[in-house]
Amino acid sequence: MPQHQPNRAKAEACRPRAHPRRRDAHCRRVRIDRGSSGKLYQVYSRDGQLLFGWDAASDRATNYVYLSGSLVARAETGQDSGLPPPESIGASPNPSTNGTYSLTWSQVSGAIRYELAEAGNGGAEQTVYSGADRSWQASGKANGEYTYRVRACSASICGNYSGTVTVKVESGIPSLAIAPNPSVTGTYTATWSAVAGATRYVLKETPAGGTERTAYDGPNTTWTSPSMRCVSR
């Protein structure tokens, strides 16, 4: 039956198994690789109409609207708002010894709100804050590294993201302070933050030109040096 040969040829040339990540079961292109321009992903209806497209490089999504089978509109989201990204973003304290820290970023003229994205310990990026404030506080973070970036938004559209800042959380490491510093009498006091679950603390000191030694080993979070320390004049 020669009239069916073209259909068979078309089926042989368009086998989904030959492109498992680029075509669906009906051989429609669901992923288009565009080289340096990135990837474009598409979703179709059962009837073969293109319903949705997402540009991974620009993070822009397009919804296709049909009426009586004809395309009548395209609605885009995530397009550039024209707002520049915040020039700076910072974190304090960094590193954090208790899983609590604050993120702050610079103001963008014309922005109504800001979106702060977080990627923690190799996980997927997610939005952790959306609002008008230019600061956000993290708490209860587990040990590891957390990367943040922020973008400015108008009423419904956001611009490009800023550069990133990475916060390291090192819970269980006390923060140490010495006062007075310098000391003119040879006497000074070391204090450090308490660590949950700790039963004792070991304080090390290294005299000038000497070797490191244990100055204190006990349950307290403060230690005062002996008063008969030599003072160089």
Image: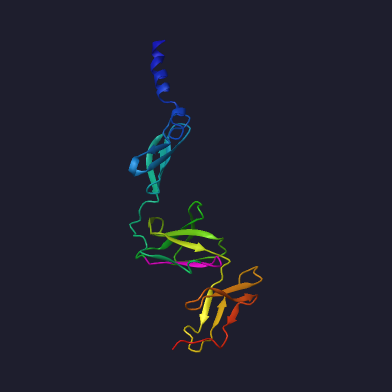
Relative depth, front residue between 97 and 140 = 97
Quadrant of the frame with the N terminus: top left
Which residue is at a point 38% across and 65% down the rendered structure image? 88
Question: Can you tell which quarter of the image residue 142 is in?
Answer: bottom right
Q: For this view, does 35 lie left or right of residue 22?
A: left
Which residue is at a point 42% across and 40% down the rendered structure image? 41
- Scheme by which the image is coloured: rainbow
* Residue lying furthest front: 210
- Image position, residue 169 (x, y; %): 52, 63
- Image position, residue 124 (x, y; %): 49, 51
- Image position, residue 15 (x, y; %): 44, 26
Up/down of 9 relative to 212, above or below: above
Which residue is at a point 61% across and 70% down the rendered structure image? 195
Q: Is 77 part of what is drawn in magenta?
A: no
Relative depth, front residue between 43 and 210 = 210
Up/down of 86 relative to 182, above or below: above
Q: For this view, does 173 lie left or right of residue 43?
A: right
Residue 2 visible in the shown view: yes
- Image position, residue 87 (x, y; %): 35, 64
Relative depth, front residue between 201 and 103 = 201
- Region of the chain picked out in magenta, as a range: 96-107
Question: Can you tell which quarter of the image residue 64 is in?
Answer: top left
Q: Is 104 part of what is drawn in magenta?
A: yes
* Residue lying furthest top: 1
Q: For this view, does 214 lie left or right of residue 19?
A: right
Quadrant of the frame with the C terminus: bottom left
Up/down of 8 relative to 145, above or below: above
